[in-house]
Image: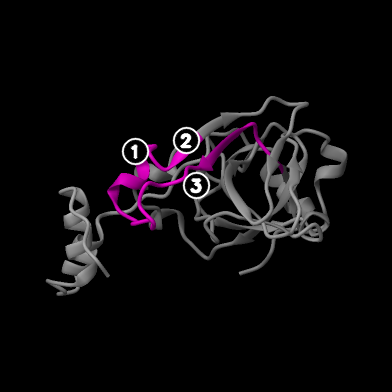
Amino acid sequence: MSVLSAKRISERLIPPPEDKCGLVITPLLDRAHMFDFDSVDLRLGCHFLLPRMLQQPYYCPDVSSVTGLHHTQVHVPLGKYLVVPAHQTVLGATLEFIKLPYDVCGQILTKSSLARTFVVVETAPWIHPEYRGCLTLEIANVSNTPVLLYPGRAICQLILLDVERKEDERTKLAPSYFGPVYPEPPKFSNPQDDLLNIGVESTWLIKRCRAERAGIVIEE
């Protein structure tokens, strides 16, 4: 596995979007400055998910995570900014829509200049071949002061790597790989279902989640 240079990335951008070997990164703004020797700068988009204060004193990762109950959607136009308080987090997305070829994977790194303000940016750590969409970014302000985020500014670097994979090894992709253009909340199954899959039939966590759905409060 080797990292694609800026020259090889540019070559992969030439084929049309429907080409199985083609790479798509759009829009390509300020192209003269977006490429480093071995990476591409991506910019912050205009849509965010802000965590809501929960009624219960904990967060239970279950199927309710995708219902919108845990986040507030916010749109910040270009030219405006979002204030992220100290020690708070938000979900954002890249301004660019990307499509990876079947033989290329990727990784996101926080831009070093931003990291020195104690802002940490990450996606799901690895981007699989054939992914397409805007990348959801987990943005954490771990500093002691509020930080302003401006949509349209470079926020992270995309590293692309070759994957040793033949074309006939391509598989049908899960729906989550196709077309997200806004930040996406986490997706979970219910914890009791995950635990039952490994033979755990009864735990305090399962009882708590079942009681929560029934509107019953149980003590720890």
Q: Check disc 2 and report the residue beneath it.
A: 179
Residue occupying image coordinates x 50% and y 53%:
129
Mark closer to the chain start, 1 or 2: 1
**Which picture quadrant has residue 125?**
bottom right
Q: How many marks?
A: 3
Neighbor class of circle 2 (other Cα within 10 Å; few <14, some 14-19, many 20+) is some
Disc marking residue 67: 1
Q: Nearer the viewer, residue 220 or 130?
A: 220
Give the distance between the C-alpha atoms of the residues marked 2 and 3, in whole angstroms: 8 Å
Element type at mark 1: loop
Residue 28 drawn at (x, y percent): 74, 34
Report if residue 143 is visible in the image.
yes
Give above or below for 165 relative to 55.
below
Q: Nearer the viewer, residue 186 or 22?
A: 186
- Amino acid type of the residue that numbered disc 3 sits on in the rendered structure: Tyr
Q: The C terminus appears in which quarter of the rendering?
A: bottom left
Residue occupying image coordinates x 63% and y 61%:
161
Residue occupying image coordinates x 56% and y 47%:
100
Give above or below for 145 relative to 82.
below
Residue occupying image coordinates x 36% and y 42%:
66
Q: Which residues are magenta?
A: 43-72
The outermost residue toward the left is 201
Give above or below for 43 relative to 161.
above
**Which picture quadrant has residue 93?**
top right
Disc marking residue 131: 3
Element type at mark 3: loop
Image side of residue 10 versus residue 30, left or right: left
